Image (spheres, helix red, strand yellow):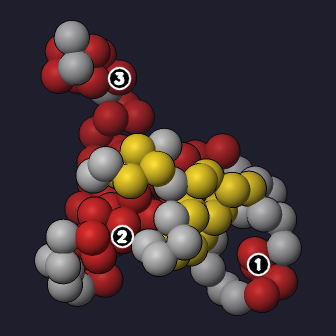
């Protein structure tokens, strides 16, 4: 998946919860986004979106507080999930 011109690998790793309490991780230096595929589908989807926001924040040096990043990610996930037609209008 491309993020700001960088090709990130999206990796499902069910060992993630054994290593930490994180649902996902983003590594900007190695261009990897890792998520736990054992999570419910909606948590997987939101985790991937959250890690994309993490990548954008780090690559653009936005220094977004994690609480703000999480709130924006959760809010947008909910809007897009509940209103899929909006994405069609935006990206048509």
Q: Position of residue 8 (x, y in %)?
A: 50, 54
**Residue drawn at x 51%, y 65% as measured from the top left:** 31
Q: Determine which residue is flagged by label 1.
A: 17
Secondary structure beneath label 2: helix
Task: Mark 3: give few (<14), some (14-19) or many (20+) Cα within 10 Å.
Answer: few
Q: Position of residue 82 (x, y in %)?
A: 36, 32
Q: Name the disc covering residue 31, or none.
A: none
Q: For the residues carrying marks 3 and 2, which lies nearer the camera in this image?
A: 2
Closer-to-camera residue (36/31): 31
**Residue drawn at x 38%, y 53% as measured from the top left:** 6
Closer-to-camera residue (60/19): 60
Let me know if residue 28 appears in the view: yes
**Residue drawn at x 17%, y 22% as measured from the top left:** 90
Task: Mark 1: give few (<14), some (14-19) or many (20+) Cα within 10 Å.
Answer: some
Closer-to-camera residue (88/58): 58
Q: Do the residues bearing badges 3 and 2 touch, measured as CB atoms within 8 Å?
A: no
Q: Determine which residue is flagged by label 2.
A: 54
Give the mark, 2 or 1, whose residue is nearer the N terminus: 1
Q: Is residue 56 left or right of residue 62?
A: right
Q: Name the disc covering residue 84, or none.
A: 3
Q: CA distance from mark 3 to mark 2?
A: 23 Å
Q: Position of residue 24 (x, y in %)?
A: 59, 70
Let me know if residue 69 appears in the view: no
Give the mark, 3 or 2, whose residue is nearer the N terminus: 2
Secondary structure beneath label 3: helix
Quick one: quadrant of the C terminus? top left
Q: Is residue 21 above or below residue 81?
A: below
Q: For the residues carrying marks 1 and 3, which lies nearer the camera in this image?
A: 1
* Image quadrant where residue 50 sits: bottom left
Give the mark, 1 or 3, whose residue is nearer the N terminus: 1
């Amino acid at each position: 998946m491309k993020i700001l011109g960088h090709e990130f690998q999206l990796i499902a790793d069910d060992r993630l919860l054994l290593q930490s309490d994180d649902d996902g991780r983003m590594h900007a230096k190695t261009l990897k986004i890792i998520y736990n595929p054992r999570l419910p589908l909606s948590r997987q989807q939101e985790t991937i979106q959250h890690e994309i926001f993490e990548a954008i924040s780090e690559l653009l040096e936005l220094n977004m507080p994690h609480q703000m990043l999480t709130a924006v990610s959760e809010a947008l996930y909910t809007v897009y999930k509940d209103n899929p037609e909006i994405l069609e209008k935006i990206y048509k």
